[in-house]
Image: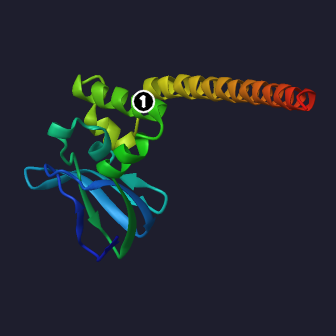
Amino acid sequence: KLFAPVEYVITQGVAPEGLYFIWRGLLRVFVLEHDVQKKIDYFSAGGFIGAEALFAPSHATFGVRNALTEDFCELMLLTREALDSTLNTCPEWEHFVLLVREGVGRSEIDLNQLAVTGVPKAFEDSFERLEKELEMKHSAQKRGGLKREKRRSTQEVDAEEAEAEDP
């Protein structure tokens, strides 16, 4: 998505479209308190904003900060729907995202922190465990596939030998 200078990408109190990855440009991110900009930060290429759109419970999704373009910006957007659709193909990742969403819902993960720094370290550790479980699962599936192939090959040889014996 392309944004012109001085255009709001995210508005505090309004649900963001999704997670924006900054490809080009500069964004000013801030919290507005009593018409005064506070906690001002700047994000450029390689940064991201709007994580709360992906991880907050769907009924509570809202922008925790404002994001205003400083110049022309080119952003890539990942919507919650696109993420959820992709997660359906990987149950382990889907489980991880659900853990984070539950953490936000139970106030174990601060939505402001999530928006600023991403997923907390404690949940990264959970993700690493899930990743190891996934590797083990794939190894087991691969071994199971090799055993099936071996069984099939043995059955084929047995069938061929039986055919050779039958004139």
Q: Give the x, y percent position of residue 130.
A: 52, 25
Vertical relation: 32 (above or below) 164:
below
Left or right: 100 as drawn, with respect to 57: right
Residue behind mark 1 = 96
Image quarter in which the C terminus is found: top right
Q: Is residue 107 left or right of residue 150?
A: left
Query: Amino acid type of disc 1?
Result: Phe
- Residue, far front: 167
Q: Residue at x 36, y 26 (%)?
A: 99
Q: Is residue 91 left or right of residue 1?
A: right
Foreground residue, 49 or 98?
Answer: 98
Sort mark 1 into few (<14), some (14-19) or many (20+) by Cα contacts within 10 Å.
some
Q: Is residue 53 left or right of residue 159?
A: left
Q: Quadrant location of residue 160?
A: top right
Q: Where is residue 4 drawn, in percent x and y?
A: 29, 77
Give the residue displayed 14% in from the left and 52% down from the top: 14
Front position in the image: 145 or 39? 145
In depth, the one of 166 and 95 nearer the eye is 166
Q: Give the image location of residue 33, x and y in percent.
A: 12, 48
Q: Indicate the quadrant where residue 117 lies.
A: top left
Q: Position of residue 61 (x, y in %)?
A: 19, 42
Above or below: residue 60 compared with residue 46: above
Q: Secondary structure at mark 1?
A: helix
For the N terminus, give its image quadrant. Answer: bottom left
